Amino acid sequence: MNKENFYFYVKVRTALNIPAKDIHEELCFVCGDETSSLKTIEEWSKCFREGREEAEDEVRSDSLVIETTSESIEQQVKEQQKRNEKVRDMPQLVRDFLDPAEFYQQIKNNLCHHIITANEGSAVGLACGSYMVTGQPSLVYLQNCGLGNIVNPIISLATSSIYGLPMLLLIGWRGEPDKPDEPQHRVQGPATPSMLDEQILFIKTLNTICIFLAALGIPFQSLPNNHDGAGQALETARHYMKTTKGPYALLVKRETFLPYKLPKIDVDVEIRLPLTREQALECVMNHFQQQDIVVSTTGMLSRELFELRTKRHDGHEQDFLTIGGMGHASSIALGIAIQKPNRTVFCLDGDGAVLMHMGILANIAAATPSNFKHIVFNNGAHDSVGGQPTVAGNHEKFSFCHIAQDCGYKHVMIATNQFEINEAMEKIRAINSDGPILLELRIQTGHRKNLGRPTRSTDENRKDFMHFLQLN
Ligand SMILES: Cc1ncc(C[n+]2csc(CCOP(=O)(O)OP(=O)(O)O)c2C)c(N)n1
Ligand SMILES: [Mg+2]
């Protein structure tokens, strides 16, 4: 957190009547050495309590920046484990990692059901329902980009001042202060008190997670990376949930857990579904024309699109990369398709993203944009963030085509290999004036290890894209 964030955090917590000492402790848990001294926080807190808007503060020393990339984490863990072996008799030099299986044992109870919901808000709803039957809080886990989706059910329903339905939020913390990350996870500017005063949803950035939780009145701490510490944190959470009946959050920093690989359940998937997302994307791109408008979904698909454009020496102006706002690529594409009826608009979507805000399919169909081509890359997983399965992987029971058709899409198709994709894309071109159309691509999970990130800024992407939209 930068200074403004600290300052604002103290202001919000003070407004909630939290003593300065507790605020300091919370900040130390999350920000460690970066935190201002207790004395400073006491002074700030006193000023805010007295109704003053400004407070004097001390100058903090610059914090240490440790660079990590997700690709290198496994390597770092291995190296650290080697170092740990060497310095076993000097415990202060040993770096711990929490074992996911052990942590699971610590949180699990007899009634454990595990459901991966279509969006984070639904998980909160599930937890509410389950609590009312069992009296046991559920664990709702999410990445911090899902906070937006949980705001409504938390603040208007579960919070202790309304129904008082406790749950434990386990939040993967991307974009921690001073850790390099993608633009959607980075601080883009301090959250200012005036924005909150105006009741504007101020979480412009995901780095403001602490302020955000504080503003929601949700107490939190970061999850320690060792068994005992994690046990204590869970105890604190349990006690809080029991006494106040409100949600409690644990923040999970990078490298808290040992790396974990999901077991491969479907062994012959590569035979049934020969293409990866990137291969399928390349086939689709072979059919793009110069004037086509492309809106791509959140996650690796946008990164692959960017790299393939570079490889083919295309420009990037045709593509809008929906790097945040998961599930909204199709509504962005619809907005464009309605305004630009003479241009073909492709929405390159993911199964997880479509499921997250599936109601938009009904709007797309009802708007009857003949130029709207919806291509869903269905790998049955949230491949970009670890491969957690989605319900769309069960092709016998679940069909995007049936859903889209019943919503009113004019044409729906499925393709699983190169030949079928070529055939479907040619058909899509042939029936250009009768849409919307949905093409479901059934593909396998997985991505290149050396996949890069877009090198053009979001600002450049938007400017070039807006210019491209003005063409006829
Ligand atoms: C609201 C929200 N929740 C979670 C995320 C984290 N996230 C980024 S990409 C992704 C997976 C998307 O799955 P899918 O659409 O199936 O695409 P795939 O990665 O499988 O290609 C998730 C969960 C996010 N960006 N926003
Ligand atoms: Mg997917």
Image (spheres, rainbow, N blue to C red):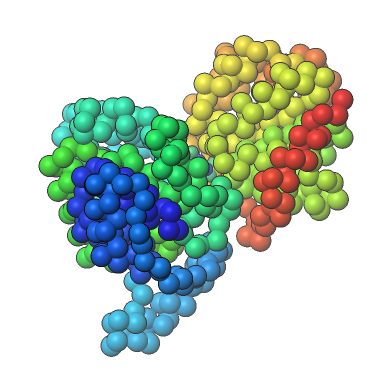
Camera sees residue 418: no
Q: Residue furthest left?
A: 243
Q: Give whichever of 172, 23 is nearer the camera.
A: 23
The percent coordinates of residue 39 (x first, y second) are 25, 65
Camera sees residue 175: yes
The residue at the point 30 percent across, 66 percent down is: 37
Instruction: Answer with left or right where residue 232 lies relative to residue 12.
Output: left
Q: Quadrant of residue 419?
A: top right
Instruction: Answer with left or right where residue 459 lies relative to residue 77.
Output: right
The residue at the point 66 percent across, 61 percent down is: 450
Instruction: Examine the rendered structure and indicate whether residue 409 appears above or below residue 317.
Output: above
The residue at the point 57 percent across, 25 percent down is: 400
The residue at the point 45 percent across, 38 percent down is: 195
Considering the image in quadrants, where does the N terminus appear? bottom left
Q: Give whichever of 313, 214 is nearer the camera.
A: 214
The number of numbered badges drawn on the structure is: 0
The percent coordinates of residue 22 (x first, y second) are 21, 56
Instruction: Examine the rendered structure and indicate whether residue 144 appears above or below residue 129.
Output: below
Considering the image in quadrants, where does the C terminus appear? top right
Instruction: Answer with left or right where residue 22 lies relative to residue 9.
Output: left
The percent coordinates of residue 215 (x first, y second) are 34, 41
The percent coordinates of residue 70 (x first, y second) are 53, 61
